[in-house]
Amino acid sequence: MSNRTFYNEILIDHNSHPYHKKVLEDADIVLEGVNPSCGDDIWLQLKVKEDKIEDAAFYGSGCAISQASADLMIDLILGRSKSEALTYIELFYDMIQGKLTEEEMEQLEEASCLRDISHMPARVKCAVLSWHTLETMIQN
Ligand code: ZN
């Protein structure tokens, strides 16, 4: 299996079985993220205790990339502190802009399967939607 096939498998898996797509009844912060150019519309929900992201989930509709990206992001930031989450967000933006080395991308774990988006400018907004939404939630 080539790397490319492997990354596509991860994307397909997170799109067809999004583990974190659900309503979080006791969420502390909820924010909608919209990408009008594609029609992606997600609601990100966080449960934060002190500085730690204790739980997170999303719901809404959108293309495969926006949905898989939200699911992959939540995998990565669950149980992390806000500043750790911000570090991942910055890394993800850098990856989408094609700025990361192979080694740096490994820190993003499965979310690194979105690396090829850097060659698909029309899909960048889909991929970063949930990450922008999370960034806004953490900073406000
Ligand atoms: Zn989209």
Image (cartoon, rainbow, N blue to C red):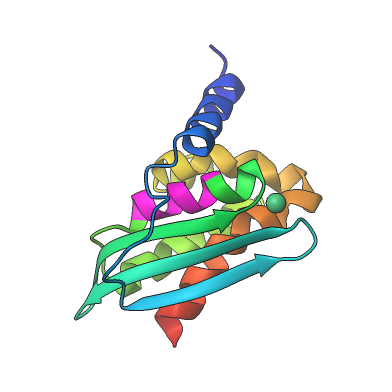
Q: Quadrant of residue 32?
A: bottom right
Compared to 116, does 69 lie above or below?
A: below
Residue 46 against residue 61 in the figure, above or below: below
Residue at 50% x, 79% y is 136
Q: Main secondary structure of the magenta part?
A: helix
The single residue placed furthest to the top in the displayed view is 1
The quadrant in which residue 137 appears is bottom left
108 to 48, vertically: above or below: above
Residue at image location 23% in from the left, 60% down from the top: 79
Q: Residue furthest left?
A: 50
99 sits to left or right of 111: right
Q: Is residue 108 left or right of residue 34?
A: left
Kindly tell me whether residue 112 is visible in this rendering: yes
Q: Magenta stretch?
A: 68-76
Answer above or below: position of 64 versus 80: above
Tell me residue 123's x, y (percent): 74, 50
Residue toward you, 96 or 41: 41
User: Which quadrant of the rendered structure holds the C terminus?
Assistant: bottom left
Residue 99 visible in the current orientation? no
Relative image position of residue 93 (x, y in whole percent): 58, 60
Question: Residue 27: horizontal and vertical position, in percent?
Answer: 31, 72
Number of marks in the rendered image: 0
Q: Is residue 90 left or right of residue 76?
A: right
What residue lies at 39% left-to-right and 68% top-to-bottom? 45
> Which quadrant of the figure has residue 8?
top right
Query: What residue is at 58 percent from the left and 42 percent from the top?
Result: 114
Q: Is residue 72 magenta?
A: yes
Question: In x, y percent, where is residue 29?
Answer: 37, 78
Q: Is residue 86 magenta?
A: no
Q: Is 58 in front, or is 52? A: 58
Image check: 134 left or right of 19? right
